[in-house]
Image (cartoon, rainbow, N blue to C red):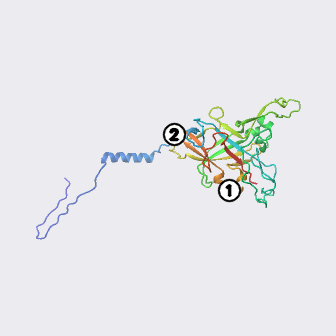
Amino acid sequence: MAVNKIRLKISDKDRNIIVPIQTSFDETGRGDLINEYEHEKVAQLVNITKDFEATQYRHGDCLGDDNLVGCDDPSPNIFYNFVFADKTDPNNVIWSNNILNYPTGIGVPSPTGSGMSDVAPCIPENWPITTPVYDDTNYGYDFMDYTPAELYKSNKDFVKSFFKLDFYDTVNRDTQKLYLSIILNPINGVKISRPTFDLNCDGVLDGIYNCRPNGEKFIQIPKFNLDMLDNNDGYFIYWLKENTFLNINTFFMSCKFYNGRTGKVHRMINTPPPTLPNEYNFDREKRLYYRVELEKINYTYKVYDYNSGVRVGLDETNEIMFYEYNNI
């Protein structure tokens, strides 16, 4: 028996006996301590499980969006519209498809590249800004130097061209990371008919195409109407199914056009450049991106205008608009 032995001597003086009392307690018990130690060591030696499984996110419904009346499709189409600038006149940047026109010689970039002209920019408040109007003379890709015949024949340079949508985790260019991209091939774009299409109509066969000046033919324009079934290349976003690996549910989408003929990359912004207060010095964070929100309950996504917060891309009246930025 382990005890402390105390010896008392006979003395006339008072005696004090110190009785030590230990106050530490073993609350969990020996077995629980062993289990706790075991779990701790296993966690150190074995990596924690992370879910890397990806899934497809479809375009989300608009039932809860107050600004969209009459939209009850659980998986609506998504609409993109890309607008190119006419760069044929060095003194005047004319926006394609009758969107915007600078008055000649007024507030236009200097042809020498030395900056703006000495005339103040003339952009009245009632400047006509409309959605593109495509017809026989304006079909969008004419400003990328593609002829109607090349579009109709699926010219190899045109087929190699594409729009690239990049998804970043932030709009801060110093810290942002690119996590995924979507490629939109012009071949899958909306088509319009050209009843007076001319394929070298000289009375002889033009390759495998007969000369039919009055025949109806279809060519692509830089617009996309994507859906879940028939034209779904670029409709879905593929991202992680769970947040255990990366907890990112908000992305910021930018756009560039890669021209398969010239090899040039054309930056696009979410605002018509002539409407910017300063066309050559503006807030890139506000003008380059759209905000994309992922919802991981039903695996859907929604696109919002970065500046107004209004949802876009649900029909032709509120398309996701990108405009070519031509920095002279």
Residue carrying label 2: 297
Residue lying at 64% horizontally and 49% vertically, measured from the top left:
289
234 displayed left or right of 64: right
Callout 1–callout 2 Cβ contact below 8 Å: no
Residue 240 vs residue 212, the one in the foreground: 212
The x, y position of residue 145, in whole percent, is 79, 43
Above or below, 25 against 182 in this view is: below
Which quadrant is the C terminus positioned in? bottom right
How far apart in space, not on screen, are marks 1 and 2 (Cα)?
38 Å
Residue 117, x across and y down, in percent: 79, 59
Quick one: which residue is furthest to the bottom in this view?
12
Between discs 1 and 2, the one toward the N terminus: 1
Residue 179 seen anywhere in this rendered image of the structure: no
Residue 324 vs 153, above or below: the answer is below
x, y percent for residue 160:
73, 40
Quadrant of the image occupied by residue 318 = top right
Residue at 70 percent of width and 54 percent of height: 276
Q: Which residue is mark 1?
A: 282
Q: Label 1: few (<14), some or many (≥20) within 10 Å?
A: few
- Residue 82: quarter of image: top right
Please, what is the three-letter code of the amino acid marked with disc 2? Ile
Residue 228, label in figure: none
